[in-house]
Image: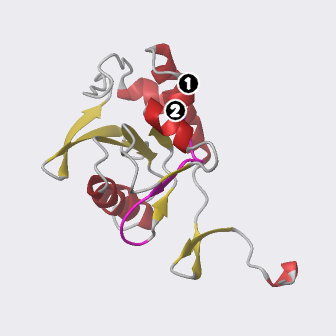
């Protein structure tokens, strides 16, 4: 067994046999995800179908799994997730995945990961809707899977966020961003 003093400090992801350091998320990201959970419960989505931060989603490519800020599963997932909170590629995809972008410009790893890498991976497993919540740019992008890729609608300011998966969702971008 390894001596604990030899282990690296900080937060890491395990990629292809290597520990890769990752930045901690901005404090407000978790608060926004929980606020979205509460908003979805308010419109009638059962609480047990909404997970924040700990539901693993297996994806093709590298890394082989992601931990989205918010996951909405189907009732069919509940029995499959009892032993391990992992949605595998053999399962039906979740109904919605949402990511809250951590601070950084368009050259940052955060931007690359949430705007480019994750949408490709999530589209490949058939996730019907993907949200990018970007506090730095004060916007929410709602991507709807169409012909294997996401077509986005961008919402800003006091615009109400429109979701085809959750038509009763009734928060504006300002309200969502105020959650942090």
Percent x, y for residue 25? 58, 54
Magenta span contains residue 180: no
From the image, which quarter does the C terminus lie in? top right
Per the image, label 2 sits on a secondary structure element best described as: strand
Per the image, label 1 sits on a secondary structure element best described as: helix
Q: Is residue 105 visible?
A: no
Percent x, y for residue 105? 38, 60
Q: Is residue 40 visible?
A: yes
Position of 167 relative to 17 (above/below): above
Colouring used for the render = secondary structure
The residue pinned by badge 1 equals 47
The residue pinned by badge 2 equals 50
User: In the picture provided, is 4 more to the left or to the right than 28?
Assistant: right
Position of 71 relative to 158 (above/below): below
| Magenta segment boundaries in residue numbering | 50-62
Q: Quadrant of residue 18?
A: bottom right
Judge by depth and name the residue closer to the eye, 168 or 171.
Answer: 168
Q: Quadrant of residue 131?
A: top left
Percent x, y for residue 162? 27, 25
Judge by depth and name the residue closer to the eye, 59 or 139.
Answer: 59
Distance of label 2 from label 1 (alpha carbons)? 6 Å
Q: Residue at x 41, y 66 (%)?
A: 108
Q: Residue at x 62, y 42 (%)?
A: 82
Q: Say if mark 2 contacts mark 1, CB within 8 Å.
A: yes
The dot on residue 147 is none
């Amino acid at each position: 067994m390894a001596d604990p003093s030899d282990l690296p400090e900080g937060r890491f992801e395990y990629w292809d046999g290597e520990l890769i350091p990752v930045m901690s998320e901005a404090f407000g990201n978790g608060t926004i995800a929980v606020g979205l959970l509460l908003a979805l419960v308010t419109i009638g989505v059962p609480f047990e179908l909404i997970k924040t931060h700990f539901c693993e989603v297996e994806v093709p490519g590298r890394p082989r799994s992601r931990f989205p800020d918010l996951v909405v599963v189907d009732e069919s997932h509940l029995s499959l997730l009892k032993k391990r909170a992992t949605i595998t590629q053999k399962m039906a995809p979740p109904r919605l995945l949402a990511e809250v972008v951590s601070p950084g410009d368009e050259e940052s790893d955060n931007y690359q990961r949430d705007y480019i890498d994750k949408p490709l991976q999530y589209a490949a497993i058939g996730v019907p809707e993907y949200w990018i919540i970007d506090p730095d740019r004060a916007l929410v992008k709602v991507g709807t899977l169409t012909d294997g890729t996401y077509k986005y609608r961008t919402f800003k300011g006091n615009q109400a966020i429109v979701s085809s998966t959750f038509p009763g969702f009734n928060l504006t971008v300002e309200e969502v961003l105020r959650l942090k």
